[in-house]
Amino acid sequence: MRHLLVTHADDPIGRRIVKQLYHDERIENLLAVGQGPAPRAFDSFLAEAPARFSYARADLAKHRPVSDLFHSTRFRDADIDTVIHVPKHGAPEHEPMPLVAGVPARTSEARLILQHSLEAKSVQNLIAVGSAFVYRLLPGNSNRLIENSELNLDPEADPELRSWVDCDMIFHAEVHGERLRTVLLRVPTVVAPGGYVYLNPILSGAAGPRLRPLVFDPMCAVISDKDVAKAVQAAVHADRSGVYNVAGCETLPLSILARWTQRPSIPIPTTVLRTLAAGASFLRAHHLRPVLAGPHLRYGFTLDTELAARDLGFRPSYRIGLARDGDGRARLEAYPA
Amino acid sequence: MSEAKPPLFLDGVLKDAIRNLPGTTSLLSRDPFAEVAVPDPFHERLEALLPPVARLRSSVAVRTSLEASGPLRAGNTALPRTKRPSPQRRRGVAVPRLSELEHAPPEELSDRLLGEAERRRITALTHLLEGGSPYDRYGFSPSVIRRIMPLFLALYRSYFRVRSSGHAHLPAEGPAILVANHGGLLPFDAAMTAVDVLLHTDPPRLLRCVVDRWAGALPWINILFARLGQVVGTRENFNDLLADEQIVMVFPEGIDGIRKPITQRYRLQSFRTGFIELALRQRAPIVPVAILGSDDQSPILFDLKSLARRLKLPTLPITPTFPLLGPLGLLPYPVRYRILYGEPLPFHERFGPEGAEDPRLVRTLANQVRRIVQGMLDRR
């Protein structure tokens, strides 16, 4: 039986993971932490007696709240043996990444969660969700990436992407350690029913038009949020450490994915986009750089998921397509195979 | 005198001891779970007031509407829900034979320009897609092939008047690597071979040509190549296509093949060896292919290599028409194409996957393939 702690459970992917794991009979205790109040979806879990689910609010980017969390009575009583770290991803569109002691909040969270997981005696496993956009993209449409493909260590990369790379390297460094079984899952663009998009530098955030280069239409690997939860569940019960690519069945051009998620893409000549990106940099609007410049706007990628299938036993079980709702509007839907 | 301060480590020990006392967490820290999260009472009351039908989630309503309306179309793309999705990597895609396919009625203008046989062949390619998805993972789209095929057929039949032989050597199933000579400034040799393979295989096979990396950065061209099923030649891409049991075409001469001057036409340049390694590892036979006509379509008089290097171009040729006629000068002359398929070379049966670890063997096999293709060209 496993005893789990899930971070950022109030964000969409964390919420989905909690829902998936709550119904897993092999999990005895489930603690969830988030920055906001408990999502309404957890009401039935919280109301159940005897309680096997708890929710608490904590700012994971700061040392004191994380220390309090890992030294709390509830954490000790639950005898937590597995920490599932879901990086923050539900921030409003174009919100600049807050800095904590000079580093992005996401990086600070990753450091603190790893440090406290190593220090807490009961914790034996650490599962972290990362982004597949950390890979270096070379000219081509599209690149097939394996876990050993080169990471994007370009110093000119935008801060958002760099924080993902930093988090990736923080957890990757611990994969071969003996103290913790560490699993890092690299997921591509995550889509959810209703047209929600997460972890995509261009499409994440509120619905609305986006700019894309006129002469490029990169292929985007996508995965349903339900499949991400299933992958995390598989990683919890596996006995392997490692870095794994996790992706769904579909790969779509950026223009089609944007249209399916109510974010129509406006093709713009590359020179105009470059000028806009330079203007954004001049005005210190660095948070606009990912949507105006970067290799992911030109070159696509797909992920080789053979390793995850072999070691974790994960295979995508949801397809992604368009459906029409009651008003006749087309919207993205994930449906079981 | 003031008392001596306790050692710092005692401070830490004391803190831990106090923390570990049951029920004492408020002195030095705040227990995040002390503030108990409870269900929203208003929400519970609302749930109780609502009739059962209204509690159905919107996704259920969507699902019902989806089932009622049958397979829906998104951007002219049908998404049937009955097909079982295959995993991210498939092994051996089952493309039906032509006799198993139903009649394909013309739907668009481009369909009317195609014959019944061609329409059926293109329809068969849709089985390469996973679970009815509109694109494969490299961006291949049968609907784009359907629209562009009339143009390619006109080039194949009327402009280049392609003749081909040795189709029996093309494997009907399983992975294979077609190794050919490269020529001409624009890759019509690859396009004509792809059309030829599509028209002369049953079940129809899509030829996946491996293109140079710089082609993936060309505006528009990168999209067109991807939609037509061409793939940038990285080791991972190549490996993945063979693992999918697809038929892949390579030009081991690379860029040297297309920029050789007219004095060296049909003289093969040195071969790269990566295709041999992958053929051995993936147990794929190698089919040598000789393409006659490609070196005559745009005869190069000079290649301004140093200027091309400064302009970051792969080649800057001088031909009888380029740059005299501007970009139009790059268009090929209406030469006759001949495509010859040689007997498959099953190196993997003799040397096995471990042969890929021996660089001398790999180089020797690459040279052997080169000699065979050169022999086929010389016998023209």
Image (spheres, coloured by chain):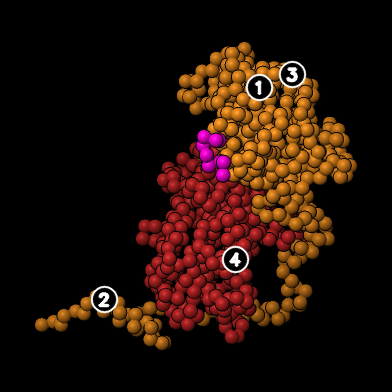
Question: Which type of secondary structure does the marked residue at label 2 adopt?
Answer: helix
The numbered dot on residue A8 is none
The three-letter code of the residue at mark 1 reads Gly
Q: Which residue is mark 2?
A: B9
Q: Are marks 2 and 1 in contact (CB under 8 Å)?
A: no
**Do the residues at discs 4 and 2 belong to one chain?**
no
Q: Say left or right for A323 vs A57.
A: right
Q: Which residue is mark 3?
A: B336
| Magenta-tinted stretch | B354-362
Sooner in the amino-acid sequence: mark 2 or mark 1:
2
Callout 2: residue from which chain?
B
Residue at mark 2 to residue at mark 1: CA–CA distance: 82 Å
Question: Which type of secondary structure does the marked residue at label 1 adopt?
Answer: helix
Image: B102 above or below A90: above
The C terminus of chain A lies in quadrant? bottom right
Q: Disc 2 vs disc 1: which is toward the camera?
A: 1
Shade of chain A as shown in the rendered figure: red
Image: A299 above or below B29: above
Sooner in the amino-acid sequence: mark 3 or mark 1:
3
Q: Which residue is more in the foreground, A214 or A179? A: A179
Q: Which residue is mark 4?
A: A234
Q: Which residue is mark 1?
A: B375
Q: For the residue carrying disc 1, how many other residues have a C-alpha within 10 Å: few (<14), some (14-19), or many (20+)? A: few
The N terminus of chain A lies in quadrant? bottom right
Sooner in the amino-acid sequence: mark 3 or mark 2:
2
Question: Which type of secondary structure does the marked residue at label 3 adopt?
Answer: loop
The three-letter code of the residue at mark 2 reads Phe
